[in-house]
Image (cartoon, helix red, strand yellow):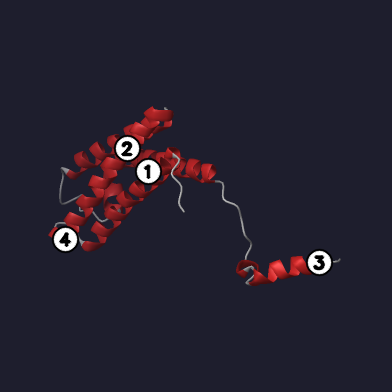
Amino acid sequence: MTTSFGALAARAHCPCEARGYTILAVNRSLVSKLTLNGLIWGRMTFGIAAWLAPRHVGSAVGLDMSGNPQAVYLARILAVRDLVLACGALGTDGEVRRQWLLAGLVCDSADTLAGVAAGRGGYLPKRTSFQLTGFALSGVVAAAAVLREKSGATST
């Protein structure tokens, strides 16, 4: 096999190949679609699980479900909200889907702030506050990424 000097020189100057890494092209549209699907199905999964088994879901994230009988009711309210947001984003496209994603972004942003306030205020254990804030923040990041891609914004 014959390799030209120019090809060897180009390869020698590429820090990725010199370290044994492979350069891959990223299809932003595919990443955006996968992120959107993850957001939708994550909301649906949480919504269904929290509606059917609110005590188990609440306990899994560190909430005191047995000490607060109203917590089951509140968990189911959140479950329905997430199911509606998921179905809205799943069943639409274009500007209408953008509106559903914005609604979810607002809800998740408020949930993120509520999680931080709960941890700082001491009415949730720090670990529980961290988990709930992380879940909400993941929704913020996912929705913002999808909305950014759909708007045509690019990074430089």
Q: Residue furthest right?
A: 1
Q: Is residue 150 above or below residue 12?
A: above
Q: Amino acid at mark 3?
A: Ser
Mark in front: 4 vs 2? 2
Residue designated by label 1:
143
Q: Residues within 10 Å of mark 4 (few under 14, many from 20)?
A: few
Q: Which mark is residue 4?
A: 3
Indicate left or right for 142 with 17 as reference.
left
Q: Amino acid at mark 4?
A: Arg
Q: Earlier in the sequence, mark 4 or mark 3?
A: 3
Measure how far apart labels 4 and 2 are at the Cα level.
27 Å
Q: Earlier in the sequence, mark 1 or mark 4?
A: 4
Mark in front: 3 vs 2? 3
Q: Earlier in the sequence, mark 4 or mark 2?
A: 2
Measure how far apart labels 2 and 1 are at the Cα level.
7 Å
Residue designated by label 4:
120
Image quadrant where residue 82 sits: top left
Q: Residues within 10 Å of mark 3 (few under 14, many from 20)?
A: few
Q: Residues within 10 Å of mark 1 (few under 14, many from 20)?
A: many
Numbered disc 1: secondary structure:
helix
Q: Earlier in the sequence, mark 3 or mark 2?
A: 3
In contact (CB < 8 Å): disc 3 and disc 1:
no
Q: Earlier in the sequence, mark 3 or mark 1?
A: 3
Measure how far apart labels 3 and 1 are at the Cα level.
47 Å
Residue designated by label 2:
102
Place of residue 12 in the rendered image (x, y in percent of width and height, measured from the top left):
68, 71
Image quadrant where residue 85 sits: top left
Q: Amino acid at mark 1?
A: Ala
